Image (tube, rainbow, N blue to C red):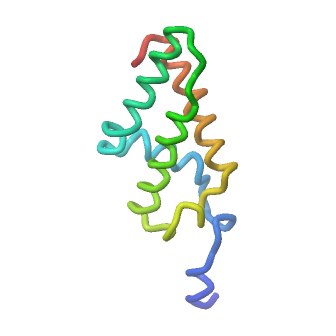
Amino acid sequence: MKINEFAQQDQNSLSFDIVDDAVVFMRNDPIFYRKKYFPAIASVADEYRNNQNLNRSVLGNMVDSGINSYCKKYKIAKAPADVFTAEDREAIIEKICSEELKEIENGAY
């Protein structure tokens, strides 16, 4: 493999699950968690406790910010759209929703 071919690999050739990796990053990066993740999930928890419809745009904005931070931190692409598809974004939102709703039901947040 030539070096320029290595640099031009697309997301399909990544040796890890980009969705899972991005979610782990969002939960474990202390700055992102404090500034973006926790406030978004706390807002979802408030809506859930008040029996309101979940505002997915809050999570969508947080995920957009998260994938931007992820790409910048790990220098995997110039733009998140080079790595993350719309389906990846929705999968991240769905994964966070399903996992955090369990925690919210158990009294977290």
Residue at 58% across / 31% down in the picture?
A: 56
Left or right side of 89 for 32: left
Q: Looking at the image, is 27 positioned above or below residue 87?
A: above
Depth check, front residue: 105 or 49: 49
Residue 24 percent across, percent down from the top left: 47, 43
Residue 9 percent across, percent down from the top left: 63, 75
Residue at 56% across / 27% down in the picture?
A: 55
Q: Looking at the image, is 48 positioned above or below residue 56?
A: above
Depth check, front residue: 61 or 84: 61
Classify the position of the N terminus by image quarter.
Answer: bottom right
Residue 65 percent across, percent down from the top left: 45, 49
Q: Quadrant of residue 10?
A: bottom right
Classify the position of the C terminus by image quarter.
Answer: top left
Q: Looking at the image, is 89 positioned above or below residue 56?
A: below
Residue at 37% across / 30% down in the picture?
A: 39
Q: How many numbered marks, from 0 up?
A: 0
Depth check, front residue: 101 or 14: 101
Task: Return the residue found at the far top.
Answer: 50
Residue at 42% across / 16% down in the picture?
A: 108
Residue 81 percent across, percent down from the top left: 59, 62
